[in-house]
Image: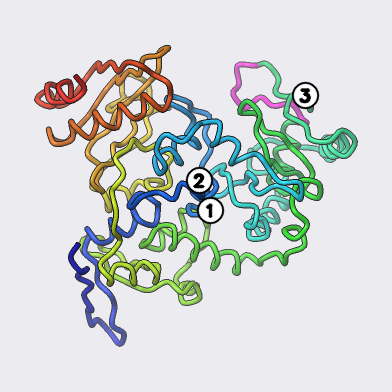
Amino acid sequence: MATASVVIVTSGPLPSIELSAAEARRLALHAQGLIGVPDRRSGVKGVLRDLGAVQLDTISVLARSHELVPYARLGAVGRGAVEKAYWTHEAHGASTFEYWAHAACILPVEEWPTFAYRRAHYRLRDNGGWGMETTREAEALVLGKLRDEGPCMTADFGGARKSTEWWDWSETKVAVEKLLATGDVVCVERRGWRRVYDLPERALPKPVLDAPELTAEEAHVRLLTLAGRRLGVGTIGDLADYYRLKIPDAKPLMDRTGLVPVTVRGWGQPAWADPAALELLASGGPRGRHRTTLLSPFDSLIWERDRMERVFGMVHRIEAYTPAAKRVHGYFAMPLLAGGKLLGRVDPKREGKTLIARKVSLDTVAGAQPMADALREAATWVGCDDIVVEQVTPGPVEAALRAALA
C-alpha cells in the first residue's frame, strides 16, 4: 500500500493537516473495526470495547441490531455468544450496562461514572424524558420491590396497560424507566428482549460505584475524546452525535481532547482526528482486508446520516416508520459494505429457512458479486438454506446478481 498523502496546509498562525476524502474514509473504517482481520480472541466484548457503545433497537429482521453490529465485524459469530458477551457477568458485578448514549445502548461498565452528569440531569425532571409523570409512591414501590425480591422485569412491576396507545404505561413502568434514567436502578441484562432491572449497588462492581463521578464538562471532554477514537476523524457535529452530547459550543473543549485539528477535502467543515489514527496513516496504514458485509442501519459506522453521505456518498434514511407505499429502499434496508465503500442496499426478511431479498438496490453491476457474497454469508449465519431475490434496481443489475447467486 502506498504511503498516505498527508498534506500540511498553512492557513493562519498554525499549520493544519489535510486529508483526502479516501484517507478519511479509511480512518473511519479502521476506527470502526471494518478493515483488517478481526481479533476473534477478544470477540464480541472486544467489539463493544472498541466501539464504546452498541445501539439497541426492537426491530428484528435478520437479527436484532445489537447482534448485527458484531456480525458485521467478526463474521458468523454465534448469536448465543453475542448475547452471552453482552449480558453474562462475573461474580464481582456486571461488565456492561444499558443506558442512554447515542440512543438506548449497551455500554462498558467502566463508563458508569462518565454518565453521572446525564443521570443528574434526569433527576431534575419529573418524567425521565418520556413526557409521562411519575409519583414518589410509584418510585418507592419499585425500589422496595427490588430491595426485597431482587432483579425484576417490567411485568413484575405491572407492565403496560392494554390500550391502542403505544406508550400507555402503568405508573410503575413509568417510574422504573425514570429510575433507570436517573441511575437509581440499572439494567445489566435482557431476557427475551425484556429489561431486567436491579439496584446499582447490587449489580455493578464496587470499584465502578466508588470511582469519582465526572462533572458535565469533564464528561463532555472524555466523550468527545472517545468519539474521536471511534470515528477516526470527524467534525464537531460528528463527535457530539456519537454520544448525543448537547453542548452549545464544543469548540473550546477540543484542545483538552488531544484530538488533532485537520481538514478533509470536500467536507467544508473543520474536523478533528485521532492522533494514533494519523500516525497509522502516515506509516502507510491501515492495512488489511476490507469486510464485505451487510450493515444494520443502526450501526455506529453510519449513525450520523450527514456524515454517512460525506464519507460514503450514500443518502440513506431508515424507512421502517415510513408508510409502505412511500418507501424507496424498503422497511429495513441494510447498506452493503465492500472494498471500503457502500455499493448499495438490500431489504431482507426471513421466512422459515429462506432469506428473502425483498428489494436490492445497487449502484453498478460491480456490486452484484459483493451483494451475492454478503447475502450468502448472512443466510448461513441465520440458518437459512435458500436465498430468494424479489426486486432488483436498476434493471441491468438484476441478471448479474442472479448469476452471482446461481
Magenta stretch, main secondary structure, is loop
Magenta-drawn segment: 163-172
Q: Residues within 10 Å of mark 2 (few under 14, many from 20)?
A: some
| Image side of residue 120 versus residue 329, left or right | right
Q: Kindly report the distance in space between the C-alpha atoms of the residues bearing marks 3 and 2.
A: 37 Å
Q: Who is closer to the viewer here, 118 or 9? A: 9
Residue 41 lies in magenta, yes or no?
no
- Ranked by sequence position, the earlier of labels 3 and 2 is 2
Which residue, as the protein is rendered here, is positioned at the far left?
396
The quarter holding residue 398 reads: top left
Amino acid type for the residue under numbered disc 3: Gly
Percent coordinates x, y for residue 47 in the rendering: 49, 48
Residue 388, compared with residue 26, is above or below; it is: above
Dividing the image into 4 quarters, which one contains the N terminus?
bottom left
**Is mark 3 in CB contact (under 8 Å) with mark 2?**
no
The residue pinned by badge 1 equals 49
Amino acid type for the residue under numbered disc 2: Gly
Q: Nearer the viewer, mark 1 or mark 2?
A: 2
The residue pinned by badge 2 equals 43
**Is mark 1 in CB contact (under 8 Å) with mark 2?**
no
- Ranked by sequence position, the earlier of labels 3 and 1 is 1
Q: Residues within 10 Å of mark 1 (few under 14, many from 20)?
A: some
The image's colouring method is rainbow
Residue 251, compared with residue 300, is above or below; it is: below
The residue pinned by badge 3 equals 158
Q: Residues within 10 Å of mark 3 (few under 14, many from 20)?
A: few
Dividing the image into 4 quarters, which one contains the C terminus?
top left
Q: Who is closer to the viewer here, 85 or 159? A: 85
Amino acid type for the residue under numbered disc 1: Arg
| Image side of residue 131 versus residue 307, left or right | right
